[in-house]
Image (cartoon, rainbow, N blue to C red):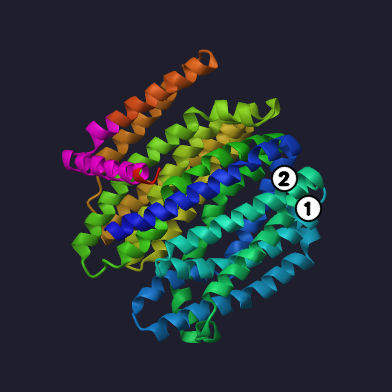
Amino acid sequence: MKRLVKNMSIYGMGSIAARAIQVILLPIYTRFLSPADYGSLELVYMVAGVLAILYGLMIGSGYLRTYYDSSDQTHRDRVLGSAFWFTLFCAIPVGGAALLFSGDLADAVFTFEGGSAFITLIAVATAIKAHNYIFYNLLIVREKAGTYVAINIITMVVTIGITIYFVVFMHWAVRGILLAQVIAYGLEFALLAFLLMRRSLLMYSAAAVKEMLALSIPLIPLQFASFVLTMADRLFLQEYRTLDEVGLYSLAYKFASIMPFLVIEPFKAFGPHLFSLIDQPEKCKRTLADFTRYYMAGGMLFALVIAIFSREVIMLMSTVEYYEAHRVVFLLCLSYVFYGLTSLTGYAINIVKKNWIIGLSWVIGAALNVGLNFILIPAYGMVGAASATIASYLVVALGRLIIIRRVYPVPFAYGSFVGIVIAGTVCYLVSTLLHFDAILSIAAKIVLLALFTAGLAYGYLNAVERDEGLRLLRSLWARFHSKA
């Protein structure tokens, strides 16, 4: 358990650092890109989401599970090499088609000019990133959290530096952002390959590919459905509202997307730990139930921290034309809380190798999301888009919890989940009433968050968990104080 906490802390702190550095780009984007440009960038990322699925058919996910089928090093080398080469075999035709038909694709998807060049750049960047994903999975299963985070942060710093140069000094706007990603991902690949490339990449097994694809292909509907849940609302906003509103909504999403790096990214350490307990089913179930309960507490707390102060931060970091973005930050943060819950429930389904259930639940959620977007966005704009997103993730999470009771019963604390979501929502609504001068408003919000945190400690956690948490905080403080 100590090793799990250590690895999760490294993943979490590294991700926080990477996200903190990336946030530096927000003032750059909001001052050198118009809301319409920012919206265009998000629509280009939508194309990247589709390409990422087609590059390798999600075989990296199958690799992560197949790795644990045997402790034999030859088996593990074989599945790594097979996953890498299969991804390359898929990337060549898919990427080639994207480059060849970039103009036609841009005309079909975008309403703005210059989309063909953007698709060319994002197709190359995504192809490189797909291979990097295989290497990152190898670091995860080897529990090389420090190396994982170090390379991630190096890539982020390079991306930011080059992006600032291209956008601020060269005035290349969206084109500069995408070109910076191509360069940074290429460097990331070089670093990962230098550290990890060995004889295992020379191995290829059709049988290993078949085994991994048996696990990953059922996840493809999941990924397409997840893509619809996270990106289709931009298309609806582009069609029924304006490209400026796409930009405002995308900025709100940027704030909300801090959530995965705070409370979902550490799952990279939890997944391998949980899979290592498969042979101890009762312990495995209890571990998943406890971790999920802690996650919901941390998820709601971080969602409130981000959402409550989003208005002040957006006003500080952007121009007046972006201010309205804060109105949907809480809804999107809460969506990420439910998204994390679906990820955790997915582990239970993955353990029994019924991945088709995961795919089906996402398909249902995506279909619901499209329907709600069609109904809500024309009337309510980005508020309707955020409402559709949160409703869809909630339906997927509830469906998973119901199914798990049959296929792999886990003693989740259902009542606690409901209670903390209600308490967090009430706390946010109260914060919207605190309209004083800037300093007094911030102070009042800090007090409100302190009260919510105290409620978590004494109303959500039991006495043993509180004592353990206090011991952990004292240990961290003593370690920090000794180094200061």
Q: Residue 483: horizontal and vertical position, in percent?
A: 38, 46
Q: x, y (%) of residue 116?
A: 79, 57
Q: Secondary structure at mark 1?
A: helix
> How many other residues sit within 10 Å of disc 2, few (<14), some (14-19) or many (≥20)?
many
Disc 1 marks a residue whose amino acid type is Gly
Q: Which mark is residue 40?
A: 2
Q: Is residue 5 left or right of residue 165?
A: left
Please give the range of residues in magenta.
455-481
469 falls in the magenta region: yes
Q: Position of residue 104 (x, y in %)?
A: 79, 59
Q: Is residue 105 left or right of residue 472?
A: right
Name the residue carrying label 1: 115
At label 2, the amino acid type is Ser
Q: What residue sits 63% from the left and 27% below the top?
A: 323
Residue at 51% x, 17% y is 439
223 over 35 or under it: above or below: below
Is residue 263 visible from the viewing direction of this image?
Answer: yes
